[in-house]
Amino acid sequence: MFQMNDLCNIDAHLSRRTLLTAAGGSLFLGPLAQRLAAAETAGGKKERPKSVILLWLEGGPSQLETFDPHPGGLIGGQTKAIATSVKGIEFADTIPQLAEQMQYAALIRSVTGKEGDHERAVYNIKTGYRPDPTLVHPSLGAIVCHNSDIGAEIPRHVSILPGNSPSRGGYLGANYDAFKVYDPANRVPDVVSGIEKTRYDARVDDLLEIAEAKFTRRRLIGSDSKRTLHAATTQRALTMMTSDQLDAFDVSKEPATVRESFGDTPFGRGCLAAARLIDVGVRCVEVTLSGWDSHINNYSLQSSACKILDGAAASLIKLLKERDLFDSTIVVIGGEFGRTPTINPAEGRDHWPHGFSMLLAGCGVRQGVAHGETAGDSDQKPEDPTKMIKDPVAISDVHATILKALRVDYTVQLQTPIGRPMYISEGKPIETVLA
């Protein structure tokens, strides 16, 4: 078992302190280093570290309006099915561009959980564990960063357009929390000095030195008067402020044709920024698209959200392939649960953690395959829809699958701050979707 580094929980407020928190959290290099990025090919060339992009569909996307249509009747509603680029696999007609990318993806149609509440289900999907009042588990991105020593000068775990539950470091420490940014059309706040270089250098050399000396006298680590976490965090923040890698957030540097393909939306720009961030060494990017909680007017709400998702997600897969990032990056598309097979009196679908869909594409993933299925007569109300699932998989299994694709040893045990041993994942990989 491995002992975690517990240097975390920096106080953070306002502009400078917000930056220090970002640097102290997302720039910290994990103690389980070299699991992902130090692998070398036979010729001695280092492989690109494995990364993950999570397209988070906040609110619960309907599998029936996206990846698992059952046209017509009580189950299918107004949604029609269309062919994908893989024979025998159909998508909803709401996502035609993603349907063309199915040849590069693996679809899981039988994800089954036990949480029907938004907050609890989000926790379950993002960590692979159900909520535990005695422990906060790390999110997928935190695990990936914890297992990689090759990082960037900017935060390695980034959440774009963070929703109600941004990914956290959990018991690994706040230093693995996602660095939160919003619409990439705007500059990342609190990372540009705003003054000319001579004055900036003077402040760093003089004023900051005085402030750090006073801080050091009050908060020491052990007996070393020079070594405080705050000083190290400040240095990482200064590195970030002067890094050329900050340009990765600026999607305006892309050609107009590329930007247009992702769509003129915050989510589209977030997906484009995600590819740029992965290219400079960020290990995990989460991009959130809300608007999927369709208890009323399900078809209208789901269709509107799909219009935003479709072009952005399809363009992301294409761009990763064009820039030689696809084989080292896994793209995960999903939300906290699906929607009910039946349509309620308000023309909506309610929460449904039984037999919903997630799409995986990229490194370690078999291409053009589907695992599991949901069935039933679309003209009859199912007596027990949970029995309509073929080859169900647990949420923990999805996590183990993603981690194995990323070459993370999901069987490793970590020590929590109170000495409690915890497996990174308790699931089993879904071998049918792994390359």
Image (spheres, rainbow, N blue to C red):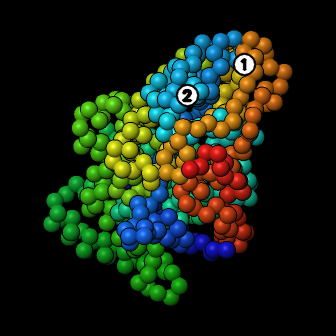
Q: Is residue 372 left or right of residue 288?
A: right
Q: Quadrant of the N terminus?
A: bottom right
Which residue occupies the extreme bottom position in the image?
223
Q: Is residue 59 left or right of residue 16?
A: right
| x then y, percent, for residue 326 | 42, 48
Residue type at the position of mark 2: Lys
Q: Nearer the viewer, mark 1 or mark 2?
A: 2
> How many residues crowd mark 1 within 10 Å: few (<14), some (14–19), many (20+)?
many
Identify the image quadrant of residue 67: top right
Depth check, front residue: 29 or 430: 430
| x then y, percent, for residue 42 | 42, 70
Identify the image quadrant of residue 395: top right
Q: Is residue 58 left or right of residue 42?
A: right
Q: Which residue is mark 1?
A: 342
Distance between mark 1 and mark 2 Cα atoms: 28 Å
Q: Secondary structure at mark 1?
A: loop
Q: Residue at x 61, y 32 (%)?
A: 60
Residue 144 visible in image: yes
Discs 1, 2 touching: Cβ within 8 Å: no
Depth check, front residue: 7 or 333: 333
Q: Residue at x 41, y 29 (%)?
A: 311
The tag earlier along the polypeptide, 1 or 2, is 2
Q: Residue at x 47, y 42 (%)?
A: 287
Q: Secondary structure at mark 2?
A: loop
Q: Considering only vertical position in the picture, is 302 above or below 21?
A: above
Residue 56 visible in image: no
Q: Considering only vertical position in the picture, is 205 above or below 74?
A: below
Residue type at the position of mark 1: Thr
| x then y, percent, for residue 119 | 65, 41
> How many residues crowd mark 2 within 10 Å: few (<14), some (14–19), many (20+)?
few
Q: Which residue is mark 2?
A: 87
